Amino acid sequence: MSVTTLSHARPIVPAFTSITDALAPFAEPLVRVAAGLLLVPHGAQKLFGWFGGYGIDATGQFFAAKLGLPASLAVVAGAIEFFGGFLLAAGIATRAVAGLVAGLMAVAVVQVHLPAGFFWTSGGYEYPLLWGIVALSFAIRGGGRYSVDALIGREV
């Protein structure tokens, strides 16, 4: 089934139809891989202090002092972002991992970013909300045709 038959809309530039139809199967995996890989550096900041992060001890202190959360949750958050990011990108245990990411982003929105307002440029919840919704879509839909889950024929 082609994209044009799904949307029932006629393209403005019909010459592009063959290109968009050929590339359409790769759109969803592109978003999954990008979402997963964009999480990895955030986890590396928390766990290892890479990319200008503070590492696990300082992140744990932030969680306890500023957020009122147990310091041990810094390890959980960092692991979901770092290891979960790789798993999401590869499409391994996609639904479970994406559910964890969506939950983590919900906590980030409520506990960290909500008081700063909407816009990410002011530290607001725009960015984690977007990534939480993207993750939620993969928790609902799964890894898709181009995932390790599909390759092995199993989903969690």
Image: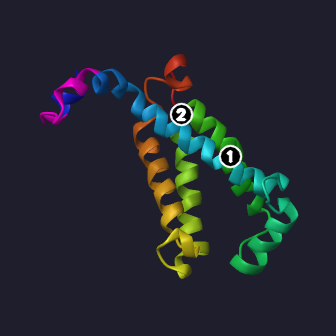
Specify few, some or many for label 2: CA neighbours under 10 Å numbering under 14, 14-19, or 20 or more. Answer: few
Helix, strand or loop status at disc 2: loop
Helix, strand or loop status at disc 1: helix
Whether residue 20 is situated above or below residue 49 in the rendered picture? above
Picture quarter containing residue 84?
Answer: top right
Where residue 18 appears, x then y in whole percent?
26, 20
Q: Which residue is mark 1?
A: 40
Where residue 123 appears, x then y in whole percent?
58, 73
Residue 53: which disc? none
Whether residue 34 is situated above or below residue 153 in the rendered picture? below
In magenta stretch: residue 27: no
**Looking at the figure, which quarter contains the N terminus?**
top left
Could you tell whether 145 is left or right of 122 in the image?
left
Magenta segment, which residues?
A: 7-18
- Give whichever of 5, 72 is nearer the camera: 5
Q: Which residue is mark 2?
A: 156
